[in-house]
Amino acid sequence: MRIILTILLVLFPTLWVGAQEQSAQNANQRVAEFINSSDLVALSGELPSLRGLVVKPLQALADALVAYHEGRHEDSNKAIAELSEYAPELGSEVVFNMLQLSVYNYLMSENYAEGAQIVDLILQTLPEGDSTAESRESLEATQRWMSALAAKDKVAILRPQTDVSVPFEIREMGRGEHIIVRLSTNEGQVQQEAIFDTGCSFSNFISTKAAERMGVEIVAEDIIVRGFGKGYARLGILPEAKLGDVTIKNMTFLVVDKLVPDNVQVDGMCDMVLGTHVIRKLGETRIEVQDKLLLLPQEQSVAPQRRNLFFNAGQYYLLCRDGEEQLTLHFDTGNVKTQLSSKYFTRFQSKVEAEGGEVERSRSGGFGGVKWCDVRTLPKVKLEVERETIKLDSIAVNLPTNYEDGELFVEEYDGSAGVDFITSAQRVTLDLKRMFFRIDK
């Protein structure tokens, strides 16, 4: 399911009653501009200092968006629930869009029963017709998903009261690498390799063959999955599995015949993907690259003063810097290598043209197929995460393409931080609960 949230907030004079001072007007105007431009990074940073100056309808909207962006899903839904009383000021379209946004919060917080009710309400409100047919199909699939899981127990992590080390493998795959962990069931009798994938959202992936071996119970059919194409999966639950000395109960899986199409040859590919549905629950995870260990510390380290990860539509995005410029990268360890986007190209065109290689065709793979694009490859890229520098070699930069009508298409974010964002360091720390990624060494 993918719902694109577009907020066109029109500020009528009545919205400013009781806030006529210049400072208050400036605060309201600033918050509105952040929302209209979808700059939730800036909104998150400035909203605390503006609180008390912003009128209630705009404050409630901003609170809902910032909490969503920061991965505080329950807080976001509390704020969204308040928005209906501000429909006259905000507009019914904004309130409806935020109701759709709440579905992500329900999925992330595993509040499937209430989420299914909200999806039903959205379906009742959604107009009939061809223009909404795709949205309706996705929402109906989401409702089947939520209804099936509403009666089941949530995913639970059981671990010893000590530091836990989980071995992993760094495996060459295609033009890059994957981080591979091993899960087991039936007291270790059944083993299964899995890709450690921060780009896999809401559930984990598994092939039909591996699901049968592991004992995955199917609870729903015809769940829509989108990657590089559209497909259908079955929804399943694995009652219990082990990841090292950690027990994972009630893992949810999207079960598909094959994780990659028949026409794509990938040596060493796994039949399971461990996604953020579990990685987030693991909490702080220290990745010791040289020792090839995932360390789950009993005592958490001190988090950075500000989050450098944010959430959108099931995915996590990393804030980093290229020189003086801030970049936003999709944080996706399921991508075998970091790749920069056409947006990056438009921002750094002179650098790419001066330092990059000749134009080549590049293939990217994912669920449902592959896509090809023209790229130029930078021999070296230095990116900074919280004042720590990571050096990456041979990084492809996508070139802008044209729509059929000739309009230029530029990607929304600056690229994808792949597994080499981790393996180029000696030690990194990841925490999808507290929303940070740190280069330790």
Image (cartoon, rainbow, N blue to C red):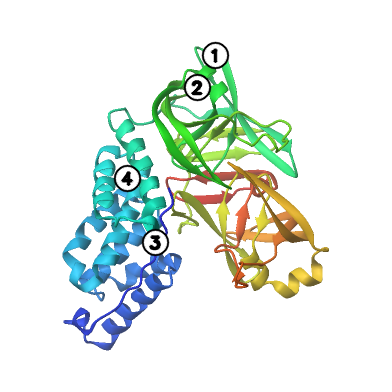
* Secondary structure of the residue carrying numbered label 2: strand
| Residue 294 shows in this picture | yes
| Residues packed near mark 4 inside 10 Å, few (<14), some (14 to 19) or many (20 plus) | many
Front position among marks 3 and 2: 3
- Type of residue at label 2? Lys
Identify residue for label 3.
5
Residue 174's spot in the image, x, y percent?
74, 41
Alpha carbon separation for disc pair 3 and 1: 44 Å
- Type of residue at label 4? Tyr
Identify residue for label 2.
242
- Type of residue at label 3? Leu
* Secondary structure of the residue carrying numbered label 4: helix
Name which of mark 1 and mark 4 comes first in the sequence.
4
Name which of mark 3 and mark 1 comes first in the sequence.
3
Identify residue for label 4.
106
Residue 392's spot in the image, x, y percent?
73, 54
Identify residue for label 1.
188
